[in-house]
Image (tube, helix red, strand yellow):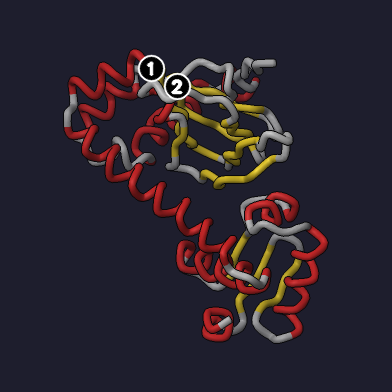
Amino acid sequence: MKIVPQMSSSHKNHPEKINHQEHLCVTLVPLFNHLDLADQQKINQLVHHRSFAKGEQILTPDGEPQLVIVARGNLKVYQLSPAGREQLLRVVAPGGYEGESQLFGAKNDDFFAEALQPTEVCVLKQSDFQDLLLQYPQLSLKLLELTADKMTAVEQQTQFLLMEKVEERLAKYLTDLMLASESPSLTIPMKMKELAAYLGTTPETLSRKFKLLETRGLIARKGLKVDVLDADGLEEL
């Protein structure tokens, strides 16, 4: 069943918050923030703003093709196997986007995006997006660049799954997360169940591997908070 999102009451009562959110969406996403401010404001007028509760689906196979830009929160992107098993593809943070393949006519049979927490997104409809590409040809080149980056991330996940030992996959994931956040104090952006699926293992095995890294003095963990104590040791693993 397709979920129709509703704006929260706080947005209805405080229009100034919506204006800030609208500005935030366009300036956050790399697809648009290289344009002049005047052009960003024009694009902003085409964007529809939506709020989703944790667990609500944002993109579904039977949904309307649209570009979804994350303004706040996180969403998980996953597909279903023929057996109905969920396979996590990635977690999209603020500034990231999904749905561009469907805008170009790619068929979506098993592609889903779901809010991992209360999430605010900006939605650009297919017709408006196609008009933008005609009006701003440089967006096509930027889109190709960003899509190439996304494919690289998919290849990196494939590398995770090729690693024989789960602790190696976990160490690689934490190292990459540390580099991306530029800090040894990390917050894992998904539940343990989802991280286990991403790394190709079970939650029970993942829990044991976290304890293994703690025993070796490489990390300290409390829930989704992880402090890297030995970055070199983690990278060597």
Question: What SS does tag 1 mark?
Answer: helix
Q: Which residue is at the front of the view, 153 or 231?
A: 153
Q: Report the label total.
A: 2
Q: Position of residue 98 (x, y in %)?
A: 46, 34
The part of the image, by quadrant, that contains residue 19 is top left
Q: Position of residue 217 (x, y in %)?
A: 69, 86
Q: Residue furthest right?
A: 204
Q: Position of residue 49 (x, y in %)?
A: 49, 22
Q: Which residue is at the front of the view, 21 or 183?
A: 183
Q: Residue at x 18, y 26 (%)?
A: 136
Q: Residue at x 68, y 28 (%)?
A: 56
Does residue 172 sit above or below 92 in this rendering?
below
Q: Which residue is at the front of the view, 169 or 146?
A: 169
Quadrant where the C terminus lies? bottom right
Q: Residue at x 59, y 61 (%)?
A: 161
Identify the mark nearer the N-term, 1 or 2: 2
Side (left or right) of 39 relative to 190? left
C-beta proximity under 8 Å, tags 1 and 2:
yes
List the residue tagged with mark 1.
126
Q: Position of residue 185 (x, y in %)?
A: 59, 69
List the residue tagged with mark 2.
66
- Which amino acid is tagged 2? Gln
Does residue 154 sit above or below 115 in this rendering?
below
Alpha carbons under labels 1 and 2: distance apart? 5 Å
Q: Residue furthest front?
A: 82
Q: Residue at x 71, y 86 (%)?
A: 216
Side (left or right) of 167 relative to 89? right
- Which amino acid is tagged 1? Gln
User: Which mark identifies residue 232?
Assistant: none
Residue density around tag 1, few if under 14, some if 14–19, many if 20 or more, within 10 Å? some
